[in-house]
Image: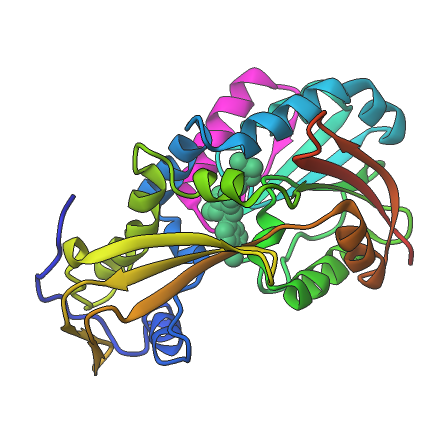
């Protein structure tokens, strides 16, 4: 663990620094969850998925493995597969094996994660054209035309949709529906509401990997701006808020400090906090309503035996 206290000079018009500053000046103070993901953040996320408490990745992978032939029956090729927030694209292997995919376009803010994924998948699936897209999907993603003779299918696993506020999720899904066009399919992974103790444990693993991942947001900000957060004095705090049906992840300051960022001094009192992530939990019904409002119909919902996770096949209406 490193604490950055070095003085780095960065131009104040650095858009990353300005975005961080805007979030830290808000009420509540926030840092976008996209800022967890520098190269180290992407590695830490993959480590989280291997923690015994983090059932999501294993469960979603199990569902995808069990529905290979169903997916192939619903999604005929040749396909251009566009994946949002692909990261290391481990689960994508199941889709690339099961479907007739001609082109794979993973979209992510983490260039290092995409490079690693493209190298691995390129050697495993030499017949598939891989085109990585380093973009922030909060903005419209520029993909260009669908390759001739292929139909576009979108994949958004990992319940990353839960990181959007539901109203933002509806807007994002609306953009995906328009990008797909009438009849286009989205395969969406959704973490479902369940016993709060199970949820709490998943975001508070005993090995402390989620805590490191959360603190990495401050390290990432220190590395890319002139900020000097004393990372060792911040604490991971995460809990399930049943009224809002979401996990909230916060960083709590344990020692008062002033942090200079992009020409401004930010003061943090002891026990001030920064909200770094929400992870909304849905039922198939609540996500179905949201998807319909965004311009999809729900074709199928597959769940594991415990009904902890859902994989939904959505079709764009217009
Ligand atoms: C929860 S992880 C899921 C990774 C992988 N899809 C999985 O299911 O294991 C979220 C992924 O979305 C990416 N991501 C987060 N915010 C993003 C944004 N605003 N634009 C593009 N990618 C983003 C992260 O880099 C990360 O790879």
The residue closer to the viewer here, 239 or 85, is 239
Q: Give the mark count.
A: 0
Location of residue 61 in the rendering, given as x and y in whole percent from the top left corner:
62, 25
**Which image quadrant is residue 220 in?**
bottom left
Q: Is residue 47 above or below residue 271?
A: above
Quarter of the image where one finds residue 311? top right
Q: Nearer the viewer, residue 294 or 111?
A: 294
Q: Position of residue 111 (x, y in %)?
A: 43, 45
For the rendered model, the colour scheme is rainbow
Can residue 135 be seen at all in this image of the molecule? no
Q: Position of residue 2 (x, y in %)?
A: 14, 47
Residue 45 relative to residue 176: left or right: left
Question: Residue 123 magenta-drawn?
Answer: yes
> In this picture, which residue range is highlighted in magenta?
109-134
Residue 25 percent across, percent down from the top left: 35, 80
Q: Is residue 256 left or right of residue 24?
A: left
Residue at left offset 45%, top offset 31% = 53
120 to the left or right of 11: right
Verify whether residue 190 appears in magenta: no
Query: Relative to 73, does residue 198 appear above or below in the rendering?
Result: below
Q: Quadrant of the C terminus?
A: bottom right
What residue appears at the point 16 percent right and 43 percent down from the top-left corner?
Answer: 1
Q: Residue at coordinates 58% horizontally, 57% vertically from top-left?
A: 242
Asked if one can make out residue 191 in the rendered structure from this viewpoint, the answer is: yes
Is residue 225 rendered to the left or right of residue 112? left
- What's the residue at 73%, 28% (across, down)? 101
Q: Farthest residue to the bottom: give it.
A: 264
- Pick the residue in front: 230 or 90: 230
């Amino acid at each position: 663990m490193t604490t950055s206290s070095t003085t780095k000079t960065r131009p104040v018009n650095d858009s990353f620094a300005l975005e961080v500053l805007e979030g830290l000046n808000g009420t509540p103070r926030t840092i976008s969850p996209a800022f967890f993901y520098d190269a180290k953040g992407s590695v830490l996320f993959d480590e989280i998925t291997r923690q015994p408490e983090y059932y999501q990745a294993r469960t979603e992978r199990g569902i995808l493995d069990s529905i290979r032939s169903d997916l192939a029956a619903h999604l005929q090729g040749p396909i251009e597969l566009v994946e949002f927030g692909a990261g290391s694209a481990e689960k994508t292997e199941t889709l690339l094996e099961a479907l007739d995919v001609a082109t794979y376009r993973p979209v992510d803010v983490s260039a290092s994660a995409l490079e690693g994924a493209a190298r691995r998948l390129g050697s495993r699936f030499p017949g598939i054209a891989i085109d990585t897209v380093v973009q922030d999907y909060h903005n419209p993603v520029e993909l260009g035309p669908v390759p001739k003779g292929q139909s576009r299918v979108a994949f958004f696993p990992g319940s990353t949709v839960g990181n959007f506020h539901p109203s933002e999720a509806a807007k994002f899904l609306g953009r995906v529906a328009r990008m797909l066009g009438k009849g286009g399919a989205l395969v969406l992974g959704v973490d479902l509401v369940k016993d709060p103790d199970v949820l709490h444990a998943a975001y508070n693993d005993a090995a402390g990997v989620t805590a490191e991942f959360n603190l990495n947001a401050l390290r990432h900000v220190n590395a890319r701006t002139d900020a000097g957060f004393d990372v060792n004095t911040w604490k991971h705090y995460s809990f399930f808020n049943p009224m809002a049906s979401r996990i909230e992840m916060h960083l709590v300051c344990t020692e008062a400090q002033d942090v200079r960022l992009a020409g401004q001094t930010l003061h943090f009192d002891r026990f001030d906090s920064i909200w770094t992530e929400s992870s909304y939990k849905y039922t198939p019904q609540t996500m179905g309503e949201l998807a319909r409002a965004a311009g999809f119909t729900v074709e199928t919902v597959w769940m594991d035996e415990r009904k902890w996770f859902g994989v939904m096949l959505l079709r764009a209406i217009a």
